[in-house]
């Protein structure tokens, strides 16, 4: 679509108020007129055609809707409503086309329905909104979700499945792999949806009854353990029933009883999960918490999702504390004590590996301390013949010693050995001096010379 004056006006507006909330006052002061149109559409068309922030688009559209803009207006040259146009995507500044997220499109449909959207409206080629979603090479979301968003008054075209298959063949022929993959992915679901939409009331009721019987079988005497194995089956059956009930609304049948039945199942599941979380509050397990979270997500139980995420967050913090405590163990006794404390922990192997590594390092330091102590004892025993030796403490308890303390013991023992060596050296030096003094008269009377004395000392040292 060319960038017309209307589009440029919207462009300028979004650039000017890029970081400002879009209010009705700002909108009005900008000179917009909801009656203004061009050959491609109105302001709704203009705002979904280019790369604007999705939340700000919604703000802008909310104002347009409140002011009474025509949600069913079709561009004169294209016959497209603004939702048709949005399904064909938007263009960025470089001219590249992109798809809006399906949640954004569903929100547009929901808002437009509140302001009189004709859910069966068609473009000039006769394509309604779901058909447009099929035909759009840009759209990346689900076609069935678009159909569901249109509500019970939407009437699926009789040739919808044939049209779907026609576009799938076109995607294959044009080697458009992204478009082809999307259509192939949803083909079975669309086929099933179309088949169900063609059921008459008797067939619908029969199918609903069959689904309900399966659901009763799955939920009979339902407990937590059974739920963990069957929750996906239960969820799929409930979703199928909801779609069938939605189809039955065309016949203006009261679904309240069956809707309450489905609601009661949700309440039952919510209670089972809540009770399980009460237990996990006191005795959390990662695998169980993840299962509860998955089930809560599956059934869209927001309160339980928040609760289980809080428990998971708290439990992960506790596990991180255990990991830090394991890393911080300093002595053998601390390591062995923690090993006993964590035997029931689900991360025992991980923590034990940390502790065993610490134990290995501490034992290595203990070995060095014992070896140095043995050397002190050995040298002390020899040295005691010549010098006075302090009593050696034979009862060394290394199990409460840190590696740093053990290193200090080794250093102290080395200092003790050096003291022995120094004292022995002094003692021997003194003995040699005494010997020399006793030999000095011989030297002085030429009975021994200096060389003889050196030879005597040398021979005794060997």
Image (tube, rainbow, N blue to C red):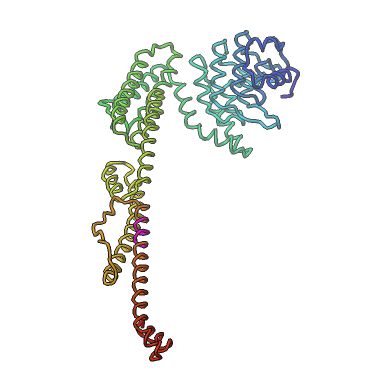
Residue in front for this viewpoint, 63 or 391: 391
Residue 355, position as x, y percentages in the image: 34, 49
Q: Residue at x 52, y 28 (%)?
A: 142
- Residue 226, picture quadrant: top left
Question: In the picture provided, is 394 more to the left or to the right than 320?
Answer: left
Q: What is the count of numbered marks?
A: 0
Q: Examine the rendering and report whether any part of residue 418 can be seen.
A: yes
Residue 88, position as x, y percentages in the image: 63, 26
Residue 344, above or below 162:
below
- Residue 212, picture quadrant: top left
- Quick check: is 269 in the magenta stretch? no
Residue 96, position as x, y percentages in the image: 68, 32
Report the quarter where the N terminus lies: top right
- For this orientation, the residue located farthest to the left is 395
- For this orientation, the residue located farthest to the bottom is 447
Which range is magenta?
408-414
Q: Residue at x 34, y 80 (%)?
A: 435
Residue 406, above or below 67:
below
Residue 212, above or below 286:
above
* Secondary structure, magenta segment, majority class: helix
Q: Residue at x 57, y 10 (%)?
A: 116
Q: Examine the rendering and report whether any part of residue 239 can be seen.
A: no
Residue 393, position as x, y percentages in the image: 25, 58
């Amino acid at each position: 679509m060319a960038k017309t004056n209307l589009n440029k006006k919207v462009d300028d507006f979004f650039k000017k108020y890029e970081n400002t909330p879009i209010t009705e006052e700002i909108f009005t002061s900008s000179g917009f007129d909801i009656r203004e149109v061009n050959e491609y559409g109105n302001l709704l068309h203009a705002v979904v055609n280019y790369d604007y922030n999705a939340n700000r688009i919604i703000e802008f559209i909310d104002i347009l809707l409140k002011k009474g803009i025509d949600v069913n207006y079709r561009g004169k040259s294209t016959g497209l409503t603004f939702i048709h146009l949005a399904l064909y995507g938007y263009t960025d500044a470089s001219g590249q086309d992109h798809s809006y997220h399906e949640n954004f499109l569903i929100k547009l449909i929901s808002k437009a329905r509140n302001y009189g959207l004709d859910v069966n409206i068609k473009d000039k080629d006769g394509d309604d909104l779901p058909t447009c979603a099929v035909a759009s090479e840009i759209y990346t979301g689900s076609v069935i979700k678009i159909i569901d968003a249109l509500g019970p008054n939407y009437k699926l075209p009789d040739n919808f499945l044939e049209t779907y298959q026609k576009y799938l063949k076109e995607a294959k022929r044009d080697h458009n792999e992204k478009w082809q993959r999307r259509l192939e992915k949803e083909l079975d679901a669309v086929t099933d949806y179309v088949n169900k939409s063609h059921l008459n009331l008797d067939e619908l009721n029969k199918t609903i009854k069959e689904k309900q019987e399966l659901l009763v079988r799955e939920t009979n005497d339902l407990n937590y353990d059974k739920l963990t194995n069957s929750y996906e089956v239960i969820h799929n059956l409930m979703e199928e029933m909801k779609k069938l009930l939605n189809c039955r609304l065309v016949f203006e049948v009261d679904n309240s009883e069956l809707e309450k039945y489905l609601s009661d199942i949700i309440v039952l599941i919510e209670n089972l999960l809540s009770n399980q979380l009460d237990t996990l509050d006191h005795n959390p397990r990662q695998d169980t918490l993840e299962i509860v979270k998955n089930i809560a997500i599956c059934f869209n139980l927001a309160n339980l999702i928040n609760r289980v995420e809080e428990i998971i967050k708290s439990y992960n913090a506790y596990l991180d504390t255990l990991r830090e405590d394991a890393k911080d163990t300093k002595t053998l006794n601390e390591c062995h004590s923690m090993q006993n404390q964590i035997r029931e922990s689900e991360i025992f192997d991980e923590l034990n590996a940390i502790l065993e590594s610490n134990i290995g390092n501490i034992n290595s330091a203990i070995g060095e301390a014992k070896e140095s102590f043995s050397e002190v004892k050995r040298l002390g025993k020899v040295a005691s013949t010549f010098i006075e030796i302090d009593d050696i403490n034979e009862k060394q308890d290394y199990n409460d010693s840190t590696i740093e303390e053990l290193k200090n013991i080794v250093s102290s023992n080395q200092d003790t050995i050096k003291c022995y060596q120094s004292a022995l050296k002094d003692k021997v030096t003194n003995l040699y001096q005494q010997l020399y003094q006793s030999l000095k008269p011989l030297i002085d009377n030429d009975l021994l010379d200096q060389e003889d004395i050196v030879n005597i000392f040398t021979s005794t040292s060997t």
